[in-house]
Amino acid sequence: MNESTTPVLVGIAQVEQRLSEYTPSAKEPVDLMIDALRLAAEDAGAPSLLTSATSVRVIRGVWPYQNPASVVAEAVGTPNAETVLTPYGGNYVQTTVNYSCLDIQQGRHDIILITGGECGNSRAKAQRQGMRAEWRDIPGTPDRMLGEDKPMAHDFETAIGLRAPIQWYPIFETALRASRGESLDAHIHRIAELWAGFSRVASTNPHAWLKKPVSAEEIRTLSDSNRGISYPYPKLMNSNNSVDMGAALILTNVATAKKLGISRDKWIYPHVGTDAHDTYFVSNRHSLCESPAIRVAGRRALELADMSAADVDHVDVYSCFPVAVQVGAMEIGLPLDRPLTVTGGLTFNGGPLNNYVMHSIARMAEILREQTGKRGLITANGGFLTKHAFGVYSSEPPTKPFQHQDVQAEVDAMPTRDLESGFMGNARIEGYVVMYGKDGFDAAWAGLLTERGTRTWAMTRDQDMMVDMTRNEYVGRTARVNAEHQFSI
């Protein structure tokens, strides 16, 4: 092993801010990033990691900063470090780790600081108080963008109103339910049990936002505190973005870790990393409940690490909604009845949007430090089950140098579908969502397959039919699509 080119994770930290009410003195996201990095250096027992770092990498969030790494770098004592920012996407934490490991392996950097943070809770409290969370202006252009922003919604999808994750993921869920041949009742009971398991993990995680265990019955039952969001998901099956959370990771090489006297029991080795994406437009996917990118990239990560799915000791499967966990686990080959999170997931651990995976990596590192020789798999997802990244970690060094593969070419060779935006006539419903409103339901959207095998989208505001769509299976039914892209049965 070449110690100067072997990447190792030596510092981790997670921070949170819990406010009873918003005040102008509340910390903003960049403050949480700075706090997290300082704590990560303390965790490693090497404060000079901060002042010696040559790259500061920030995961894009829902804040106005243009170059937050510049303020972070100045605050932690390395003002001349390279500044890096990612596009939007929950995959980018693991992708950033993957490419940071390559940078260390190839000698471009010896110490890399990675951080991110969100203040969705304080921002929501400010709004409820009739205030606006005042966050500083951080202008400028990062030295490097790690990745590129690409549109993930087709013009036709947005034209008929399909824009948000809370619409897309339930469509995937109903498609998956039908593919499994489940009744509506059996399905909601099963995924509520899955989510209750995530809640139990959160109750043992010292960093989780919601530590009180929630039962499967509470999760699946609509109530004043668990309102319907988008059928079949109530609030407790959605990512919890109302959190103020930050995290940080510090990567270096073995030689530098030794030079700085960082205790060996702090070291966690990234073994492999992979990246890939499914079609950027959901319309072009061959199936609404499968992910070729997860299948290829997830299994390739295990292959590169000389592992099978059964060899994974700990895993955190990205969990913005239940369907993301189910598709992720099934494509990788992980059984759904095994523990699939180390944090409690984005509902119970908290979902600080694109930065969640930094928390899952930090928590995985804590567990692996305690369990010498065990191996952990991290999965990351961005967009509408669109962009994916994977990493394998262990307290023990890999038998081969760090390996990374972008397997996009293999994914691109798999079947896709054409979108038929001008379709009128009969088509078969493939998946659907019914959106809850203040009184009853607001609207429903369906993905439909035509006899030619193309896909189209349509919507309805028929109250009677929307009620029935929550009581009876509509996937597989033939619907009539008119010129206004509305469907009827």
Image: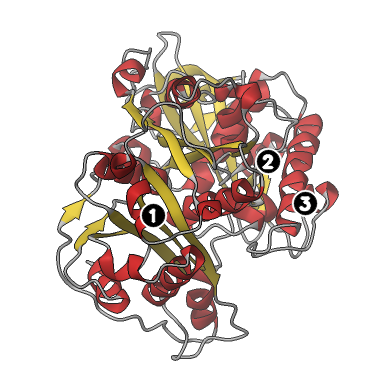
Q: Distance between the residues labelled 3 and 2?
A: 38 Å
| SS of the residue under disc 2 | helix
User: Mark 1 vs mark 3: which is more N-terminal?
Assistant: 3
Depth check, front residue: 326 or 415: 326
Q: Can residue 307 be seen in the rendering of this structure?
A: yes
Q: Distance between the residues labelled 1 and 2?
A: 65 Å
Judged from the image, the secondary structure of the residue bearing numbered disc 1 is: helix
Who's the residue at 64% across and 65% down the image? 209
Which of pointers 1 and 2 lies earlier in the amino acid sequence?
1
**Residues under numbered marks 1 and 3 in contact, where contact means CB atoms less than 8 Å apart:** no
Q: Residue at x 42, y 43 (%)?
A: 382
Q: Could you say which disc has been placed on residue 257 in the image?
A: 1
Q: In which quarter of the image is the N terminus?
A: top left
Picture quadrant where residue 316 is located:
top right
Residue topped by disc 3: 200
Residue 293 picture quarter: top left
Q: Residue furthest top?
A: 452
Relative to 469, say whether 430 is above or below: above
Helix, strand, or loop for circle 3? helix
**Coordinates of residue 95 in the picture (x, y in percent):** 36, 42
Q: In which quarter of the image is the C terminus?
A: top right
> Residue drawn 68% across and 41% down?
464
Q: Is residue 65 visible?
A: no
Q: Nearer the viewer, mark 3 or mark 2?
A: 3
Q: Where is residue 348 in the image (x, y as percent from the top left)?
A: 66, 57
Percent coordinates x, y for residue 261 in the rendering: 42, 61
The residue labelled by disc 2 is 464
Closer mark to the observer between disc 1 and disc 2? 1
Residue 332 x, y percent position in the rendering: 55, 24
Residue type at tag 1: Ala
Q: Which amino acid does label 3 sit on?
A: Arg
